[in-house]
Structure formats: structure tokens, C-alpha cells
């Protein structure tokens, strides 16, 4: 029983990191109607930025983390401006291929600078003893991942539902033309969405690289794909869906690793996705898609 | 100088020459109707005025400002609201959220409250349903919401695209009454309609559009008795 709780908590922790990444996927999809497959690689860039900053003697951990998040945010805005904005009216396939291209570009730049070997990442909370609650030992990274993700999800939900900029994002995601008629600057709103999504990826990179203390140019690709699955699982375009989908995915993955097989855990995750999509094609929280007549 | 001046406007959709040199004027306080068959280019003209579709050549001037050079999201701030074809309300948001998005460019909270209460006075049904998700409203209520949303920007001119489309005859009369009453409080109206009879009955002047050209224009009272208009658009 104790070990089950510990697997569950670790699953929730991993899942909340997936949820943070999935939020970026789902928000960008909701507003720009595109799958930003470079999103996972933004995590990798964030990881390397923090890694590099921390290895310089003068830079304290907190500042490294902030630099990492800022770099991710700026990178997200730049990618949107340079790669996706010129394709705003292009067919979706062209945008998808561009996103895959950006993903490879980022990976290869990292390969050139850092090489292909994994390097060990120093956790941002090193030398902090794990906490034992009722006989279950939980690492500090796990607790921080869950707490930070929860705070971010609450803030993001409040931002979208309570602020004018959040309402503008909802309006743009539903109808760009009508949003423009209201006086909403659609391009600025799309930029803001990419900025928020990428900042969340930056936060995810801190949590991910601290919990699984390694970094390589491919660090972002598997979590990126898992988070994409989580977003589809929860219903792509839905913000609560991404949160629920991410956490469920982490829990399913961790429990399958513990009780079934660690080799098969990814296969089980994708199997569950397939079953969910057969039963409910729009995902758990997915909206019915209104076809225009 | 007229409030809205459209001069020699040409619009292309790819290779299709949709608007072939259209000129017209809207004076302050008027109701102007643009009538014509499906595909004549009425909606395209409105979309070009508010910047949703780029003009190929020609100019649109509103109170002396060249709208061709104004970004689409800045136009509502100049005092021009557009009730688009098919209403295009934000289906997933509530009635109240839709109305507040109409006031997106305004900052004075007290003035917004003021406009909101006049909108609610004009459309009591919207007040009753202020927390309802907009997509669950009936067609007529959605049209009222689209008009209320446009009025929330406190416009000096309102462009209305097919407000009667898909509505029951009862709602059609109600919507046209509302258009007249909005106009009587000083808001200029540019009305695009397939229901030519209704449109001509409330308009001061009208322009008849055929495949991208204005073929006829004049006082609405004269046009309603014009033989060619009667035959082509009034079904008499």
C-alpha cells in the first residue's frame, strides 16, 4: 500500500509536468489551430540554458531558472514570428511540416553546441532531504513539481477567465475575424499565447531536468510527444482537458512501470489513448466541433 | 463631406474580380441599404470597409480617415461597428461576456456600464439571459446579441450584414424595428440585405449591386417603385 501511494504521488508529479507542457500545446492549438511540434524542443533549450547558466560560477540557481524561462518565452515568440506567422493563411500541412522543421533545427543547433551525449543536470533543489509523510518518502523535486504546477494552473485559469487579455484569447480562438471587429489585435494575442505556452515549457524544463537529472538535445522530444498525447487525451484546445490529461497520463505511465512492465509503459499509455479516442473521439473534455453549414 | 466615402473600390479573391469599381457615400444619420442577389458582392464590400478583406485598389474614407491604411482592429475604435453575416457571436462565451467584448476598446468603466444598461433596455431578453452560453440562444436572440455587442462599442455608424437571414417573420419585423430605433437615436446605418422589400421600406437611400457593380441608386421610395427593381428583387 505504501509503495502504491509513492508510485501514485510520483505519477502525479510526472503528470503535472506533462500537464504544463500540454497546456502549451493546447493553448497554441486553440488559438492558432496548429500543432507546434517544436514545443517539446523549447523544453530542451530551457534545460540547456539553465544547465549553462548554473555551470558558470557567478550565477545563482534562482537566476538561472529565471534566465531559462525568459529564454524559452522569447524563443517561443520569435519562432511564431519567423516561422509560423508568414504561414497564417497557408494550408495546415505546410504549417505542420514547418513545425517539425523548427523542431529538428533546435535539436541540431543543440547538437552542434553541446554534442549528442547526455550530461548530468544538477537539480535546482539539491541537498534538500526527502520528506516522509506517514511512511511514504517523497523527494523534494516531486513535491515542488506538484505544487508549482498546481499554482500555475490556478493562475492560468484565473488569467483566462477573469482578465481582458484572457477573454481576448478566448475570442480569437473562436473567431479571428469577429475578434478583430471587436478591436482585438489578433497578432498580438497569438504572440501572447506563444509567450505563455513557451514560458510554461520553461517551467517544465526546470521541473523535468531536476526530477530526471539529465540533459541532451533529445531531452524534449519524448516528453513533448507525451504531452501532445495528454492534450489530445484531455481534448485538444481545452485547458482543463490538458491539465487532467497530463496528470492521468503521468499516473498511468508510472503505475504501469511499477506493476506491469517498465518496457511496456509507453505502449500502455498509447493504448489507453487509442481506447479513449475510440470511445470519445474529442477527448475527455473535448468540445463538440461545430461544422459550419 | 460625407461620413463614409467609398471610391472606386476593387476587390479580388485570388483571380476572381469580386468588386469592380464601386463608389458610394453614406451621410451622417442616414439608413443606406445595399441590395442585390446572392454573390453580388454585398458582404465583400462590408468586409473590405472594416478591413477583414484587403482592397485591391480604390479607397474607403471614414470621417476623413483612410481605412485602407488602418489595421482592422483599430477601426472599431474610430466609431464603426460591424454586425457580420451569420452573426458570428462567440458561441462558447456567455451573453454578458459577448457584450463586454463589444466594449473591448473602451476603458471608462462608468461609460461602459451606461451603454450596457441602454443595450439591456433595448434588448430585455439579453438581460434575462446574461449568464447563458451564447451558442444556446435562438437565432433571433443571437441576432439581437450580435447587434447589442456592436452597440457596446458606442458606434457612430453600424454596418449590418443580412440581419434578417434565417429568422422567422416575427423576428424579422422586430429586428427592422430595432434598426430604425437605433438610427433614430443618431447612429448611422449601412444595411446589407437580401430582403430588399424590408430594407427599402426603412432606408433613406439605396444602392443596387449586381456582380460587383452598382447598377442603380437613388431614394429608397423611388427604387421601391422602379420596375426593374420590382421585377428582380421584390418578386412582383
Image: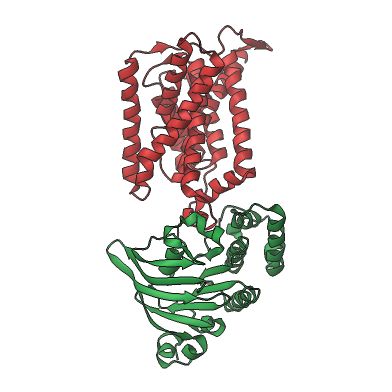
Chain colours: A red, B green
Quarter of the picture containing the C terminus of chain A is: bottom left
Q: Residue at x 32, y 64 (%)?
A: B12
> Quadrant of residue A74 in the image?
top left
Quarter of the picture containing the N terminus of chain A is: top right
Residue B185's place in the image compared with A221, above or below, is below
Q: Position of residue A73 (x, y in %)?
A: 48, 31
Q: Position of residue A8 (x, y in %)?
A: 58, 21
Q: Position of residue A208 (x, y in %)?
A: 49, 20
Does the rendering let one see residue A272? no
Q: Residue at x 37, y 22 (%)?
A: A218
Residue B214's place in the image compared with A175, above or below, is below
Give left or right: position of A153 versus A259. Answer: right
Q: Residue at x 27, y 63 (%)?
A: B15
Q: Residue furthest left?
A: B15
Please state which of residues B42 and B141 is positioned toward the viewer in this rendering: B42
Residue A41's place in the image compared with B68, above or below, is above
Amino acid at each position: 500500500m505504501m509503495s502504491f501511494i509513492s508510485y501514485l504521488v510520483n505519477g502525479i508529479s510526472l503528470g503535472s509536468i506533462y500537464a504544463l507542457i500540454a497546456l502549451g500545446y493546447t493553448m497554441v492549438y486553440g488559438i492558432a489551430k496548429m500543432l507546434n511540434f517544436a514545443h517539446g524542443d523549447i523544453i530542451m533549450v530551457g534545460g540547456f540554458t539553465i544547465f549553462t547558466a548554473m555551470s558558470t560560477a557567478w550565477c545563482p540557481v534562482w537566476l538561472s531558472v529565471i534566465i531559462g524561462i525568459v529564454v524559452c518565452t522569447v524563443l517561443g515568440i520569435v519562432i511564431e514570428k519567423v516561422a509560423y506567422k508568414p504561414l497564417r493563411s497557408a494550408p495546415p500541412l505546410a504549417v505542420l511540416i514547418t513545425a517539425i522543421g523548427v523542431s529538428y533545427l533546435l535539436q541540431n543547433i543543440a547538437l552542434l553546441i553541446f554534442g549528442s551525449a547526455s550530461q548530468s543536470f544538477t537539480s535546482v533543489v539539491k541537498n534538500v532531504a526527502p520528506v516522509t509523510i506517514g511512511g511514504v518518502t517523497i523527494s523534494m523535486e516531486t513535491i515542488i513539481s506538484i505544487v508549482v504546477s498546481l499554482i500555475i494552473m490556478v493562475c492560468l485559469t484565473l488569467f483566462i477567465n477573469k482578465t481582458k487579455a484572457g477573454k481576448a484569447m478566448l475570442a480569437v480562438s473562436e473567431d479571428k475575424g469577429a475578434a478583430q471587429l471587436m478591436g482585438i489585435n489578433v497578432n498580438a494575442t497569438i504572440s501572447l499565447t506563444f509567450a505563455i505556452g513557451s514560458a510554461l515549457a520553461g517551467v517544465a524544463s526546470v521541473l523535468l531536468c531536476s526530477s530526471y537529472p539529465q540533459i541532451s538535445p533529445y531531452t524534449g522530444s519524448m516528453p513533448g510527444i507525451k504531452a501532445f498525447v495528454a492534450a489530445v487525451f484531455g481534448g485538444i484546445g481545452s485547458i482543463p482537458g490538458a491539465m487532467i490529461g497530463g496528470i492521468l497520463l503521468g499516473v498511468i505511465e508510472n503505475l504501469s512501470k511499477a506493476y506491469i512492465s517498465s518496457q511496456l509503459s509507453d505502449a500502455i499509455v498509447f493504448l489507453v489513448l487509442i481506447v479513449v479516442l475510440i470511445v470519445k473521439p474529442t477527448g475527455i473534455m473535448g468540445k463538440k466541433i461545430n461544422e459550419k453549414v | 463631406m460625407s461620413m463614409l466615402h467609398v471610391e472606386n473600390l476593387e476587390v479580388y479573391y485570388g483571380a476572381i474580380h469580386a468588386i469592380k469599381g464601386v463608389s458610394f457615400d453614406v451621410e451622417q444619420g442616414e439608413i443606406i441599404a445595399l441590395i442585390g442577389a446572392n454573390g453580388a458582392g454585398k458582404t465583400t464590400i462590408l468586409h473590405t470597409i472594416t478591413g477583414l478583406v484587403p482592397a485591391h485598389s480604390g479607397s474607403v474614407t471614414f470621417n476623413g480617415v483612410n481605412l485602407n491604411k488602418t489595421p482592422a482592429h483599430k477601426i472599431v475604435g474610430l466609431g464603426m461597428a460591424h454586425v457580420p453575416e451569420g452573426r458570428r457571436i462567440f458561441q462558447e462565451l456567455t451573453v454578458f461576456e459577448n457584450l463586454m467584448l463589444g466594449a473591448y476598446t473602451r476603458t471608462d468603466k462608468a461609460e461602459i456600464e451606461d451603454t450596457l444598461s441602454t443595450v439591456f433596455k433595448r434588448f430585455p431578453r439579453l438581460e434575462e439571459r446574461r449568464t447563458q452560453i451564447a451558442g444556446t440562444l435562438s437565432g433571433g436572440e443571437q441576432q439581437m446579441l450580435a447587434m447589442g455587442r456592436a452597440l457596446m462599442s458606442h458606434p457612430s455608424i453600424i454596418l449590418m450584414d443580412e440581419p434578417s437571414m434565417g429568422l422567422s417573420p416575427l423576428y424579422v419585423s422586430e429586428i427592422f424595428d430595432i434598426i430604425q430605433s437605433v438610427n433614430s437615436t443618431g447612429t448611422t446605418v449601412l444595411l446589407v440585405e437580401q430582403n430588399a422589400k424590408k430594407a427599402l421600406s426603412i432606408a433613406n437611400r439605396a444602392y443596387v449591386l449586381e456582380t460587383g457593380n452598382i447598377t442603380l441608386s437613388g431614394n429608397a421610395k423611388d427604387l421601391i417603385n422602379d420596375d426593374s427593381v420590382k421585377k428582380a428583387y421584390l418578386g412582383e
